[in-house]
């Protein structure tokens, strides 16, 4: 599968990059994507939620009134869950939400996510660019040239590019990640997926393909 490589000004470089059909050309497996996204979101939860039950609420040690003779219901504590200020019945307790998935399933989910982006025509390949210092204005100009301004964009870079990351982190709806660290959720949670040209090779390596991706002049 071949796709045009764009310049940062939005025009074509005249080159095409050959994307691996094993990564970008499979039939997306929606259930694998669902399981991977569900696992990712579950793993983001801290699980530190806690409410106090009847025995944990301070006070209420004294019986509020005598057992009999008042004509009302019996009460042993003012911290009963039935009372205002009382404990909680079956409230949440700290727990671990982590979900682990088989490696083959996670691999299938990521390839399905990349293939889904290609299928929906939401993937762009742009020539490599970098900034020595943060340049948000220039980053915005690149997005505008790619017709991605104002849209939810994920840019995948080859390795840690601090200048590019800092240039994009203050732009609403824009996220910059290293290509080998993008999860299935990250790949899908955007309107446009932009890959730097050299990032395609980095993605291929994460799937066990160490060969260089061919580019046609």
Image: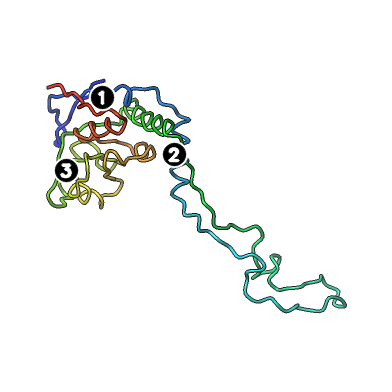
CA gap between label 1 and label 2 equals: 24 Å
The residue lying at 22 percent from left, 42 percent from top is 159
Residue tagged by mark 3?
Answer: 141
- 34 to the left or right of 22: right
Res 36 quadrant in image: top left
For the residue pair 147 and 163, the one nearer the viewer reads as 163
Residue ranking furthest to the right: 69
Residue tagged by mark 1?
Answer: 19
Bin the neighbour count of mark 3 within 10 Å (Cα to Cα): few under 14, some 14-19, many 20 and up: some
Bin the neighbour count of mark 2 within 10 Å (Cα to Cα): few under 14, some 14-19, many 20 and up: many
The residue lying at 34 percent from left, 25 percent from top is 119
Q: Earlier in the sequence, mark 1 or mark 2?
A: 1
Residue tagged by mark 2?
Answer: 37
- 77 to the left or right of 127: right
CA gap between label 2 and label 3 equals: 32 Å
CA gap between label 3 and label 1 equals: 27 Å
Q: Tell me the element at label 3.
A: helix
Bin the neighbour count of mark 1 within 10 Å (Cα to Cα): few under 14, some 14-19, many 20 and up: some
Res 152 quadrant in image: top left
């Amino acid at each position: 599968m071949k796709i045009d490589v764009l310049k940062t000004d939005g025009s074509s470089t005249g080159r095409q990059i050959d994307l691996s059909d094993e990564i970008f050309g499979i039939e997306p497996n929606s259930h694998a994507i669902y399981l991977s996204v569900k696992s990712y979101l579950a793993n983001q939860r801290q699980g530190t939620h806690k409410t106090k039950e009847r025995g944990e609420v301070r006070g209420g040690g004294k019986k509020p009134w005598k057992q009999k003779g008042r004509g009302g219901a019996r009460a042993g504590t003012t911290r009963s869950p039935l009372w205002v200020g009382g404990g909680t019945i079956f409230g949440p307790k700290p727990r671990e939400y982590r979900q682990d998935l088989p490696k083959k399933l996670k691999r299938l989910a990521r390839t399905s996510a990349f293939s889904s982006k290609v299928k929906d025509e939401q993937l762009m390949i742009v020539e490599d660019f970098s900034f020595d210092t943060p340049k948000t204005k220039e980053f915005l100009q690149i997005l505008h040239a790619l017709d991605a301004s104002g849209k939810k964009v994920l840019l995948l870079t080859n390795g840690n590019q601090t200048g590019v990351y800092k240039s994009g982190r203050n732009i609403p709806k824009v996220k910059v990640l290293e290509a080998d660290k993008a999860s299935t959720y990250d790949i899908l949670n955007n309107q446009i997926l932009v890959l730097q040209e050299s990032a395609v090779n980095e993605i291929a390596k994460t799937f066990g393909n160490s060969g260089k991706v061919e580019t046609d002049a």
